[in-house]
């Protein structure tokens, strides 16, 4: 097998170090092409072959592209079946954090929060919830999980994936897929490959060498194939000059020939660019329509431009998966009912397990004593539940309580919990006196069905200031022109469809858009037009100014001064379709935090953010709790962690940079966002924490960081060979030295190989173990470091080589807090 280190490898203990008796001379090849490694899957059985022979060309083509769903369940895609042959229709739903249809579903925490638990078994149960609900809600294929690595902190979908580390991502995606498919729902791993940003995602050309691909991004996809994922979604972007959805190197040479993938490959939505080139390279299905794989594909076959054998091949791949899931012979189990209570229980468990405590000065958390009886809650996401990010990740939850309600409930009768907005997301009413004429109610203008409503007037500003205009609307977005300039033009591309999970909807459900403009003192011409549509609509026009902001901050400071402790909720609203511009918090939240912490140093900041955040205000805070997008049970989980009902069990799966100038893609536009449509992955294998180690850059918080409410000691390191599987076992004792039960995540890091002449990371994550210990309890922990983790991709051999020689082994609680150290001497097979 590819993950096998020589069985002749011998290790012996030498004091605190481990070594091999004889020195190795070179990195030796790992046999990546063994039969077991190149598993082809079940292949096409007699039933599938019979169907392929009996299908007409029209029917075959109809199976290879999307269409319109006659039932309209609100899912992302639909493929009509062939009823006369018993081939069922397929419904394909988004689902990174729950099933995205028009019906209610369990809104699970974002995958990045799941990943923070460092618990593959929990990922499996997360997948089981989605798998059961997908089938219960009439779906057949899940367009998830996403396993693209976090390469830049700006990527708009960082919350939908697992982290920056290839090993951790591979472990988690494999288990989540197992959970999904155990329930009978076909999983789709995405986006294959190198889809690590939203900016220019439809066209960016990623230039990356094969070693970087195999050692970083591709590892998660390979793990997905190894556990039998049914489908792969091709990415929008180009890879080395060729669109991913027609890239023969990726789709044929890597995915099928090297990894033995037997399922089907679909495009991301509208990611097809050709007919003959795409199907020839290994693409099987175009979604969501048939621009290239519909009539154009039929014509290409009839004219001889595409061999019908290519169409048969794609149909065979699709039907092979359907057969495997019992969808061709009726052996698939009946669709289950939803189990909302069970889903909610897993959602709560994940949110608690992934809650990551970044700072805790003087034991500010958990809240005890006076802090539990006198609290101020500040921030818009303190009173509004922040369930999920925007775009494909949005789920309609069964319920979602606000953190304020959960905190009040947990604090109990007699506690004083005061709330202040602090940062206004939805604007204040525009004074009627500021408008020159009547006929417009800015707080609730009704437009009747079929009516075209217009208004022209003058808006007068008392002083020069920045105004953030906020429009709320229930139908088609009104057109608002200020001095002849449209404030809310349609967003380019898919921006209209992919909006944030919080700031794009008002508490009463109206859609929201906002625009900040400098407004000079005096009168400004304002023109508004709105359509009532078929049902009529109501819209509002509000604003945020320096004056309204100052009043909000003043109210927050009064609340902070009147309370013993403060819990300040800060947000960053990410969505598919657009990247962040900065790692700083949006709006004026930094100023709010500075002001509140100056008024009350016993302030805990809770972050509902998608990815890494800079914190120039960090030293002023008492504690910082990272909750990402915590799903429908996020309020209960946040309260549980704040009050110490559970230990914060999460650890960072991405390095947090100090600021926008110190991270792997900073300062080099060729790395991000690209120059002239080309982006270079010139950091090579030094992704995430590996870059910080190589460059000697101090992060704000390192990969793997996270605090507990207790303390732990690590001791007594030993390393032993792992037997037939290859690799080695790292064993050590972990002891809870505090007075509370708690959780630590033990992490093993392995240094580079001296025998392989390739640029290497200073250290790589070799393995990890989530450990829960009672107060005073000790346990011996063993972590397996696999041979694959010890191997490197040799571009000269186009294969893996074992990294032999004397290699450092370190154990700690983060990539920068390494508490134990030893050595292993890896020896390759001879003869």
Image (cartoon, rainbow, N blue to C red):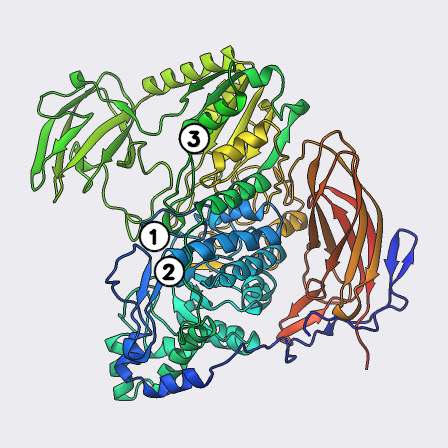
Q: Is residue 202 visible?
A: no
Label 3 and label 2: CA atoms lie apart by 30 Å
Callout 3: SS: loop
Residue corresponding to mark 2: 139
SS class of the residue under badge 1?
A: loop
> 517 left or right of 795?
left
Res 500 → quadrant: top left
- Say whether marks 2 and 1 touch (CB < 8 Å): yes
Give the residue number, with chain letter if any, for mark 3. Answer: 402
Q: Looking at the image, which residue sits at the far left?
A: 451
Q: Residue 16, position in %: x, y?
A: 89, 51
Quick one: 571 or 509, which is closer to the camera? 509
From this viewpoint, is residue 595 visible? Answer: yes
Above-or-below relation of 375 to 537: above
- In front: mark 3 or mark 2? 2
Label ID, residue 101: 1
User: Where's the N terminus, which quadrant?
Assistant: bottom right
Check the picture and name the quadrant holding the C terminus.
Answer: bottom right
């Amino acid at each position: 097998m590819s993950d096998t280190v020589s069985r002749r490898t011998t290790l012996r203990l030498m004091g605190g170090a481990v070594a091999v008796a004889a020195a190795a001379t070179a990195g030796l090849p790992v046999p990546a092409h063994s039969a077991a490694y190149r598993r082809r899957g079940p292949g096409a059985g007699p039933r599938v072959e019979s169907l392929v022979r009996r299908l007409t060309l029209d029917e075959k083509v109809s199976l290879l592209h999307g269409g319109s769903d006659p039932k309209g369940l609100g899912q992302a895609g639909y493929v009509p079946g062939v009823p006369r042959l018993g081939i069922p229709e397929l419904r394909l739903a988004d689902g990174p954090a729950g099933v995205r249809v028009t019906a209610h579903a369990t809104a699970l925490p974002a995958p990045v929060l799941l990943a923070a638990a460092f618990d593959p078994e929990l990922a499996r149960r997360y997948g089981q919830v989605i798998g059961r609900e997908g089938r219960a809600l009439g779906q057949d294929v899940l367009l998830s999980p996403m396993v693209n690595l976090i390469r830049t902190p700006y990527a708009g979908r960082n919350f939908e994936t697992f982290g920056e580390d290839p090993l951790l991502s591979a472990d988690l995606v494999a288990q989540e897929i197992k959970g999904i498919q155990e329930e009978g729902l076909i999983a789709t791993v995405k986006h294959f490959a190198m889809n690590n940003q939203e900016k220019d995602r439809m066209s960016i050309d990623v230039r990356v060498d094969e070693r970087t691909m195999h050692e970083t991004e591709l590892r998660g996809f390979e793990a997905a194939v190894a556990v039998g994922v049914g489908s792969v979604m091709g990415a929008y972007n180009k890879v080395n000059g060729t669109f991913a959805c027609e890239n023969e190197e990726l789709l044929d040479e890597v995915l099928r020939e090297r990894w033995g993938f037997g399922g089907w490959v679909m495009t991301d939505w509208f990611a097809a660019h050709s007919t003959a080139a795409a199907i020839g390279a290994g693409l099987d299905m175009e979604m969501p329509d048939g621009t290239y794989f519909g009539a154009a594909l039929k014509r290409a076959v009839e004219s001889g431009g595409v061999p019908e054998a290519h169409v048969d091949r794609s149909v065979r791949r699709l039907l092979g998966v359907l057969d495997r899931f019992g969808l061709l012979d009726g052996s698939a189990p009946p669709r289950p009912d939803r189990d909302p209570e069970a889903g909610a229980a897993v959602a709560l468990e994940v949110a608690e397990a992934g809650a990551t405590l970044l700072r805790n000065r003087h034991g500010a958390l958990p809240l005890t004593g006076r802090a539990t009886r006198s609290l101020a809650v500040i921030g818009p996401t303190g009173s509004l539940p922040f369930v999920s990010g925007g775009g494909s990740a949005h789920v309609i939850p069964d319920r979602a309580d606000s953190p304020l309600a959960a905190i009040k409930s947990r604090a109990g009768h007699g506690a004083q919990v005061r709330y202040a907005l602090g940062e206004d997301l939805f604007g204040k009413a525009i004074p009627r006196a500021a408008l020159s004429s009547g006929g417009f109610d800015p707080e609730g203008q009704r437009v009747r069905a079929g009516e075209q409503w217009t208004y022209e007037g003058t808006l007068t500003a008392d002083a020069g200031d920045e105004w953030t205009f906020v429009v709320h609307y229930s139908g088609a977005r009104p057109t608002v022109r200020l001095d002849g300039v449209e404030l809310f033009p349609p967003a380019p591309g898919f921006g209209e469809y992919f909006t944030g999970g919080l700031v794009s909807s008002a508490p009463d459900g109206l859609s929201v858009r906002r625009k900040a403009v400098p407004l000079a003192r005096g009168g400004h011409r304002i023109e508004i037009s709105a359509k009532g549509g078929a049902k009529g609509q109501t819209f509002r026009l509000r604003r945020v100014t320096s004056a309204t902001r100052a009043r909000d901050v003043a109210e927050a400071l009064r609340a902070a001064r009147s309370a013993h402790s403060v819990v300040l909720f800060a947000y960053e609203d990410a969505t598919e379709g657009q990247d962040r511009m900065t790692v700083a918090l949006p709006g004026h939240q930094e100023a709010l935090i500075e002001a509140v912490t100056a008024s009350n140093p016993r302030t805990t900041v809770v972050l509902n953010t998608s990815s890494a955040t800079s914190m120039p205000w960090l030293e002023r805070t008492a504690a910082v709790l990272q909750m990402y997008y915590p799903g429908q049970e996020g309020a209960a989980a946040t309260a549980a962690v704040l009050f110490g009902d559970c230990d914060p069990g999460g650890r960072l799966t991405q390095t947090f940079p100090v600021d926008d100038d110190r991270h792997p893609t900073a300062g080099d536009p060729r790395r991000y966002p690209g120059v002239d449509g080309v982006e270079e992955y010139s950091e090579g294998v030094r992704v995430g924490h590996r870059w910080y180690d190589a460059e000697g850059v101090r992060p704000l918080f390192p990969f793997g960081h996270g605090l507990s409410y207790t303390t732990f000691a690590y001791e007594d390191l030993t390393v032993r060979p792992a037997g037939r599987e290859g690799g080695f076992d790292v064993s050590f004792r972990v002891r809870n030295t505090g007075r509370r039960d708690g959780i630590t995540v033990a992490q093993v890091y392995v240094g580079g190989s001296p025998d392989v002449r390739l640029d290497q990371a200073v250290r790589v994550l070799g393995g990890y173990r989530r450990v829960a210990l009672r107060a005073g309890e000790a346990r011996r922990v063993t972590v397996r470091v696999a041979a694959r983790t010890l191997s490197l991709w040799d571009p000269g051999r186009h294969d893996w080589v074992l990294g032999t020689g004397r290699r450092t082994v370190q154990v700690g609680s983060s990539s920068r807090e390494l508490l134990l150290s030893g050595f292993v001497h890896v020896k390759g097979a001879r003869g």
